[in-house]
Image: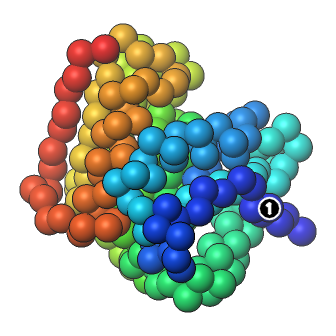
Amino acid sequence: MVEIIAGPALKALSCGKPAFLVVLLHGEGGCGQTMIDLAVNWAPAMPKAEFLAAEAPLAGRQWRDRNEGLAPTVAALNLFIDEQLAQRRLPDSHLALVGFSQGANLALHVGLRRPESIAAIVALSAAAYGANALPAQLPTRPAILLAHGEADCVAPYSAMLDAKAVLKAAEIPVWSLKRPGLGHELDDDGVEAAGRFLAQHVVHKTAAPHDHEHDHAH
């Protein structure tokens, strides 16, 4: 049975019981520490949030099984999230998922299917996410940020545009960040934008227009 293991964590800077939980999902072949290193940049604006990295359970630090796809990991991740929220006595509305690459696709898949709406999803350099990736009936519509390098050769930038169109058509509040000249990686502007998005939509719950796009020079 697939089991998600808790990786490194960054405790709430407020030193008290966390009021929010951000679960971080690394890319294929990566590890939780790379995601926690990003969270160090976000924590000051979210002092009551705890950041927790999950470690991919399959060989090669993968989330997707070659034969069964994401299904086994999805079930395990939902159980992992349920346990982590219960330990902290937090509702789904105080949860965000942040993923990079394969982890971004997993964040989108799970975050859009939770029975109770989570606060936000940040998908960094996600792979193709077409219309058939959405369930027929969406139980929830969390705020989503898609950030992507325009020169990404692993997950083409066009994949982000396609995902954005699918999500908009489903009336999901989606924002996007285009990074000209950037490959399958993150840069300072992308990391900062993700932090602002999390602070706004997890902690402050700021309402915003249905569709918004940021373009920053690399």
Instruction: Assign a secondary structure to mark 1.
Output: strand
Q: Whole-percent x and y of residue 164?
A: 30, 44
Q: In this view, does 179 lie above or below 104?
A: above
- Residue 204 position (above or below residue 92): above
Q: Which of 43 and 162 is in front in this view?
A: 43
Position in image of residue 128 (x %, y %): 48, 38
Residue 34 seen in this snapshot = yes
Horizontal side, residue 126 vs residue 216: left or right? right
Residue at the farthest left position: 209
| Left or right: 42, with 16 as reference point | left
Quadrant of residue 77 in the image? bottom right
Q: Position of residue 167 (x, y in %)?
A: 30, 54
Q: Which amino acid does label 1 sit on?
A: Ile
Quadrant of the frame with the N terminus:
bottom right
Q: Quadrant of the C terminus?
A: top left
Residue at which label 1 appears: 5
Residue at 14% x, 65% y is: 207
Q: How many marks?
A: 1
- Residue farthest top in this picture: 181
Q: How is the image coloured?
A: rainbow
Front-lying residue, 36 or 112: 36
Instruction: Using a 10 Å C-alpha cutoff, classify the residue at mark 1 as few (fewer than 14 neighbours), some (14 to 19) or many (20 or more).
Output: some
Q: Which of 119 and 111 is in front in this view?
A: 119
**Residue 208 or 88: which is nearer the viewer?**
88
Residue 139 image offset from top left, x and y in percent: 39, 79
The single residue placed furthest to the front in the displayed view is: 15
Residue displayed at 30% across by 51% down: 197
Relative side of 164 to 213, left or right: right
Q: Residue at x 32, y 67 (%)?
A: 203
- The residue at the point 40 percent across, 52 percent down is 44
Can residue 109 be seen here? The reply is no
